[in-house]
Image (spheres, rainbow, N blue to C red):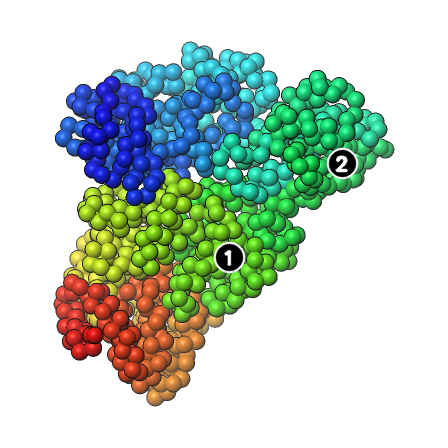
Amino acid sequence: MNQFAAQDLERLLGDRYAIEGFLASGGMGVIYTARHRSLGSRVAIKVLPPEVASSAVRMARFKQEAALAANLSHPHIVPVFEFDVKGNLAYLVMPFVEGETLEQRIAREKKLDYPSVREMLRQVGSALSFAHARRVIHRDIKPSNILFEKATGRWLVTDFGVARAELPGAEPITRTGIAVGTPAYMAPEQAGGKKNVDARADLYALAASAYEALAGELPETEHDVEHHVSRLQALRPDLSAKVVRELVRPLALSPDRRPESVERWLGELEKAERRRAVKPWAAAVTAVTAGVIGWIALRDAPHNPEDYPVIAVLPFSAGGPTPGIDLDSVVPEALVWQLQMLPELRVMGAAAVRRAVERRLGNEPQPLDTLLSLARDLGATLAVVGRGEVASGNVRLSVQVHETATRRLVSSADTAGRLDSLHALVSSLVVQAFARELARERSGWPGPSLPRGLAAVAAYFQGDRDFRRGAYQSAIAHFDRVIQLDSTYAPAYFKRMLAIVQLSPGEAQIRSALRAAESYADGLDPVSRQLLEGYTALVRDGDLRAAEAAFEEIVDLYPDAVDAWFALAELRFHFAPLLGRPLSEAEAAFQETARRDPWFAAPVAHLITLAMAREDDDATRSWMRRYLEIDSTSAVAELVRAADTLIFRPELAPRVLSSFPSRSREFLENVAFIAAEFGRSPLERSIGMRAIDVLWERAVGSAERERAFRMRIAAFLGSGREASAMRLVREAAARGVPREELDRWIVLSAVTAIPDLADLQTTAAAARRLAESPELSVVERWLAARWYRTQNAELAQDLAIQLRRSLQTRGEILPLEQSLLDDLAALDLLAAGDTAGALALWRRATRRFSVEQVPFSLVASLWPLRLARVRYAAASGRFYEALDASSSFVRIAAFVDQAAWPEVLRIRGEAALEVGDTALARNTFAYLLQVLASPDGSGTAARERALRTWERIKP
């Protein structure tokens, strides 16, 4: 296949990428490495040359690869950043995965250790499960399409060029009877060109790849499972018969005899691993290793596998006879086996270490220094030594971990008890010597709590590692595993909650997870307990200030508590408008988090946003580069690259905007939120509107349509496009927006006057439907009660009474619900002439929030209450209070907050003039004119009014 000169490719791609060189070629194109000129990050560019592009089938596959990869957003699927056709050449741009393929690793190592293969199966399996759930069959799983990213330790799936997608409008690329894929890894039905090839063909290919990685040879395709079992056992005697049988089950010739899904297969494999034939005492002693691996692997957070600590488990010594236990060989073997199952550690084989000791030192006992010197000569950075004594049915075990270079004792522990309680005794060693140390490093507290059992500890450490690297889906899965194994372990609920927030703010399960954690608060260490108290104040009570005080106290007492710094930073970032805090305080807390844990992805992502808000180009570029070092493949990484183009190469903005239809919903919602919150220029705000337009056009199902409608109408109202908002309301029903959502907005606009979105008759009908609904929500009762205050005072009072009684009957009143009740009470005070009392009640009501509902909810940010406080404070001449109340709108806590911008910003500017703060007034009216850049309807009059004021006060 022809290669291209670097200068020819650069002309093809424009000047964004500097071509570094040729990487590889195959039947579907030539791949080059390049570097993004402004970010400095490396990418892989796959080019389909003219002689290949002339094949309609190959061009169709190439386009499909781009389309499928762009729509399969998963931590273990290599994404496609962009795709284009220039003349008779087509290309796509992907992240450069620095590392190697599974094929290259097999060629280098011949046979891989089982834990590495098992982790590959878990990660690649999760990617395939994700694709299968979306009716996409890869059809070309093989070692060359499985990549290992050295910086993150992730296995990734690539090349969806021959995948089959059962998607609307999809057309088959190949004719029935034509086999596609790589023959050596193809399931029999796929090799035969059968039509109904399903997900079980991918299982076959993945199992064949795993078989090759373990055996050093491919399975013989003409044979069935029993032959594969015998052959693999002969080649890998270290694997148990049960594990081998489960490994090869997907290689059955008939698809009906294979596991029905990836999850089912890996679940059965996990059961086989737990049943592995290890003597009871050996299985018990293996628990010691959990702490070793976790502490060592995460203490310094190395991210290059070649930098991971290397452990040598030295032969155990015995203090006297040990009937029934061969301490010298069985215990080290068990330790090694368990150590290999945990991340970020390289473990030397126990048999190899034992042979080296015997060859160099003989069988006589040796001094510790001699053993450590030998371990260092073997390449180990840490050595595990142990001693055991058995007498009269009792056993005493001790374990020590030493640095081989310095001879420093890293950790030690000992325990004693009945021989039949060996498992519990070894678990005690894990807690004392190893796992606690890792937890201490993470929590900042010298005596932290841990989940029960080796499997739970390992899952927690892995989840924590994934969370910090931005692999949130994987982190959630690991924390779910911890909760399954130890439902009392509160920190797992915390971390799961934080991961969910990063993926999908506003998830209702945050509250239920917190309730579960509260049940076990007494068993937590002080740091975790205070974190729980802070989250309880935040989620259950909706008290932002109490939560902030709790997090501040933790970082004062325990300044190394990374999770507390992150919690404080997140609170100050997302709720700065409601706390009245400057963004600089959130930025400082995120910087502290990143300084203490440089490989924590989430704070770096926030620091990018904050640098953008300050228009600090150098800091923005720096944090972007840092993020892409941590995470190069997630949806956030995709967003970072798009932001780089939009900010630093605005002439290429149309290309990014044209890619929006192929972007994920998460990506588009993030773009819309950031543009609304920080966008100032017409271009920046138009980018956010374009993201909303795409969400609206492609929304499927009532939930998606409701959310897209909510975002679209809020953006229209926030930019003074009132005629557009009213037209949207009229058209929305035909587009499938639920009637209840339309009624809520029609009544909400009437009771807040932002302005009215419908005439009086339409609004009355909407209010009546809300009031008479048999499944009336709290928000709908509140809206109806507010509406009828001016239409039917008796009915309004009845609705308010019904609302209070229903909440009292239920028992628990959520923060949002109590605040809405207070709003109705404030309106009663206002009607009675007590403006001061009403304002005081609104102040109190807007200090508690149902925080998990805020980002995309209708009123959870309490913006109608905050708007009322702004209005009535200004109307009663309380201009300083009006300024205080309006400051909460300068940034948005919820997307819908912007609906109030035109009025709030006007009142804020006028209040600033009343108190003599001309500079604030100028800034506010200048911003208001930016917001009202393209108004329509009555928004045009609002802009003209703002412009007259600006002309009067501008410098």
Residue found 45% across the figure and 59% down from its top: 588
Cα distance in 3D space between marks 2 and 1:
39 Å
Q: Quadrant of residue 926?
A: bottom left
- Label 2: state its secondary structure: strand
* Three-letter amino acid code at the position of disc 2: Leu
Q: Is residue 804 above or below residue 294?
A: below
In the image, residue 419 lies at what x, y percent? Answer: 78, 34
In the image, residue 46 lies at what x, y percent? Answer: 27, 29
* Three-letter amino acid code at the position of disc 1: Trp
Q: Is residue 923 above or below residue 41?
A: below
Residue found 77% across the figure and 26% down from its top: 366
Q: Which circle marks residue 565 in the picture?
A: 1
Quarter of the image for the N terminus: give it: top left
Which residue matches tag 2?
397
Quarter of the image for the C terminus: give it: bottom left
Q: Is residue 813 above or below residue 610?
A: below
Q: Quadrant of residue 635?
A: top left
Q: Which circle marks residue 684 in the picture?
A: none
Residue extending furthest toward the right:
392
Depth check: give the residue in front, 24 or 191. Answer: 24
